């Protein structure tokens, strides 16, 4: 594949820098391994004298537990790796020299009336978000397979709904990184700040008042009642658009 | 603000439905965004009127939204210059007469908080040839080039180009490209985005012109600095530039690399204007047709390179001036004085 446009350039970036294959490997691994641990948690606890007492009171694992184990790990380790992976592509002005090159490529093409910074940022965001969703889905497919084999099939409707909500959350994370990357001085700063923001957003979902509307609430294994998530969906969609608009404006005003 | 907080308090006290509470969340987000935007403007914007920044901050926070509105409508400052364009040494240097220049700046000003920057520069770049911009570190060369390219915004003054903005190319001292692309892909991508009407064969021709035909299919991550600099020039040339700006193009090169690049720039300058900044006076003397000397943000000389030596204090009848002495005289003894060619 040759980079003949800024969109194709991003696709080539994800392939040639091995970002995509690395993330696919990690997420599929998580998807395949964590349901096994969930299914055998009682057995694992029984084999240690310190935790044997806990095993006795443990309920039998359910299909939702298998999926939840995967999602829980995605929200921690997976999220950090994901953010580090997308921080590079989403920091187009990571150095002055790189910024001048990217600026000179994007300034001649415009999406309608949007500034040239949108030409630069939106393909990067789109590909990063698509890649993120793809690896999450592949990991989820692995988790579904293992869960079905070991514990039993999860309810397909709940699983699909939960997966869709999780994908929406990952797109929001991409928008957060895009905004920070538009302003931050380098990839490391972008990644660090983004992890911090996503961490705080994750903690905020436990808040008694606004927790139900926090985007992090969408990262759920299986959604039994989708209507419970509607406030979070609304906030996530609105803030994603706002974050992207903010990123375009910030990058447009940024000097090199 | 207080009313909103009270509403939140009541909702908390009465344990209202989380769904209802969620409706308030966007409003809270909006309020937070307004406060952050306001504070950023107070601290990053022009100096506010009537009160210091810290006091405006306190006012904005203590009585939101009224304090912030008061700042917006009353206190927000405008950019002012404490030195007018007619100050000595800052006026447009029209004494350097160029017929049909490719670029002209008038009273261009950009100040930084430490007092450095560009302080009223009138640069005139001829349509062909190399224009060498020289000056000590911190004299404002890079800022001036960035203002001309449009990647920084001036506080005052004008940049007039005799060509569309897309026909201006800028190369930093050490260009950076995606290291996982080949040289051919880098130039071809630039062709598709900046000059889509050019045939695909132009990519190979440009690479050959800059001496990278043999490395066209190598990934640029392994290129030497000299090769990267020439690749930067190839990316610039593919877009039919009317003006190529190069900031310290030879700074990171060895002597052989410098000689190659200067020879290449001389060839390019026969068909387009090239504006370069450099510390190397000898190189400028050899390559540039026109020279501008920057000092403390001002242009203290602008004119033919040959005319610069006349400012050597030891030059006289029958004795040719020395370029380095002339430069030192202009940037030392004659600080702040405009010396027109």
Image (cartoon, rainbow, N blue to C red):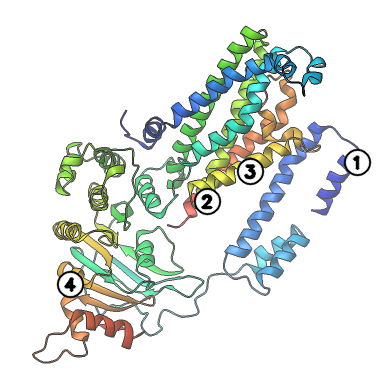
Does label 1 lie on the same chain as label 2? no
Q: Which residue is mark 1?
A: B13
Badge 2 or badge 3: first in the primary sequence: 2
Q: State which chain disc 2 sits on.
A: A
3 and 4 marks in contact (CB < 8 Å):
no
| Residue at image coords 26%, 64% | B276
Q: Residue at the far left: name it.
A: B318
Q: Find numbered disc 2 in the image and state the secondary structure of the residue it sits on.
A: helix
| Residue B105, quarter of the rendered image | bottom left
Q: Which residue is mark 4?
A: B285
1 and 4 marks in contact (CB < 8 Å):
no
Q: Position of residue B247 (x, y in %)?
A: 31, 61
Q: CA distance from mark 2 to mark 3?
A: 14 Å
2 and 1 marks in contact (CB < 8 Å):
no
Q: CA distance from mark 4 to mark 2?
A: 40 Å
Q: Find numbered disc 4 in the image and state the secondary structure of the residue it sits on.
A: helix
Q: State which chain disc 3 sits on.
A: A
Q: What is the crowding at mark 1: few (fewer than 14 residues within 10 Å), some, or many (at least 20)?
A: few
- The answer to whether any part of residue B126 appears in the image is no
Does label 3 lie on the same chain as label 1? no
| Residue at image coords 27%, 67% | B278
The residue nearer to you, when weighing A13 against B22, is: A13
Q: Which residue is mark 3?
A: A197
2 and 3 marks in contact (CB < 8 Å):
no
Q: Position of residue A212 (x, y in %)?
A: 75, 32
Give the number of the mark in front: 1 or 3. Answer: 3
Q: CA distance from mark 3 to mark 4?
A: 54 Å
Does label 2 lie on the same chain as label 4? no
- Say whether residue A12 is left or right of residue A72: left
The residue nearer to you, when weighing B82 against A177, is: A177
């Amino acid at each position: 594949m040759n980079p003949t446009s800024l969109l194709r350039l991003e696709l080539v970036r994800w392939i040639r820098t091995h970002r995509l294959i690395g993330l696919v490997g990690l997420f599929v691994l998580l998807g395949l391994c964590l349901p096994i641990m969930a299914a055998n948690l009682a057995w694992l606890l029984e084999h240690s004298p310190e935790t044997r007492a806990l095993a006795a009171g443990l309920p039998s694992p359910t299909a939702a537990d298998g999926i939840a184990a995967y999602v829980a790990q995605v929200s921690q380790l997976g999220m950090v790796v994901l953010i580090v992976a997308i921080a590079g592509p989403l920091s187009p002005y990571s150095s002055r020299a790189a910024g001048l090159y990217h600026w000179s490529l994007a300034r001649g093409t415009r999406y309608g009336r949007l500034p040239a910074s949108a030409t630069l940022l939106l393909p990067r965001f789109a590909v990063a978000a698509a890649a993120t969703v793809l690896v999450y889905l592949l990991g989820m497919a692995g988790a579904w397979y293992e869960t079905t084999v070991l514990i039993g099939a999860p309810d397909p409707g709940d699983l699909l709904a939960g997966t869709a909500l999780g994908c929406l959350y990952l797109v929001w994370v991409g928008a957060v990184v895009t905004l920070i990357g538009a302003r931050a001085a380098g990839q490391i700063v972008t990644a660090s700040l983004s992890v911090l923001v996503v961490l705080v957003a994750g903690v905020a979902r436990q808040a008694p008042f606004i927790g139900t509307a926090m985007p992090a609430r969408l990262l759920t294994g299986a959604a039994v009642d989708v209507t419970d998530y509607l406030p979070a969906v609304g906030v996530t969609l609105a803030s994603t658009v706002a974050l992207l608009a903010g990123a375009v404006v910030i990058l447009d005003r940024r000097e090199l | 603000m207080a009313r909103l907080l009270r509403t939140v308090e009541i909702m908390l006290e009465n344990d209202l439905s989380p769904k209802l509470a969620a409706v308030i969340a966007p409003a809270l987000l909006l309020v937070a965004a307004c406060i952050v935007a306001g504070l950023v403007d107070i601290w990053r914007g022009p100096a506010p009127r009537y009160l210091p920044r810290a006091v405006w901050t306190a006012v904005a926070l203590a009585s939101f939204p009224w304090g912030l509105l008061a700042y917006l409508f009353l206190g927000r400052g405008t950019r002012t210059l404490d030195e007018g364009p007619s100050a000595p040494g800052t006026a447009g240097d029209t004494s350097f007469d160029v017929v049909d220049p490719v670029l002209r700046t008038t009273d261009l000003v950009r100040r930084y908080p430490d007092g450095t920057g560009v302080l009223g520069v009138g640069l005139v770049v001829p349509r062909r040839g190399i224009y060498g911009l020289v000056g000590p570190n911190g004299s404002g060369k890079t800022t001036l080039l960035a203002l001309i390219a449009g990647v920084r915004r001036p506080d005052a003054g004008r940049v007039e180009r005799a060509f569309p903005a897309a026909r201006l190319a800028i190369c930093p001292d050490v260009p950076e490209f995606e290291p996982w692309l080949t040289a051919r892909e880098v130039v071809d991508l630039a062709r598709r985005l900046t000059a889509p009407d050019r045939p695909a064969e132009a990519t190979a021709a440009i690479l050959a012109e800059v001496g990278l035909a043999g490395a066209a299919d190598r990934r640029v991550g392994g290129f030497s600095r000299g090769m990267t600099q020439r690749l930067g020039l190839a990316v610039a040339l593919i877009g039919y530039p009317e003006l190529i700006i190069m900031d310290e193009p030879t700074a990171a090169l060895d002597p052989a690399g410098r000689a190659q690049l200067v020879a290449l720039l001389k060839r390019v300058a026969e068909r387009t204007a090239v504006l370069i900044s450099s510390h190397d006076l000898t190189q400028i003397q050899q390559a540039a047709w026109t020279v501008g000397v920057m000092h403390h943000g001002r242009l203290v000389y602008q004119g033919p390179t040959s005319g610069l030596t006349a400012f050597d204090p030891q030059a006289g009848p029958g004795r040719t001036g020395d370029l380095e002495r002339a430069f030192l005289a202009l940037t030392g003894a004659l600080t702040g004085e405009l010396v027109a060619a």
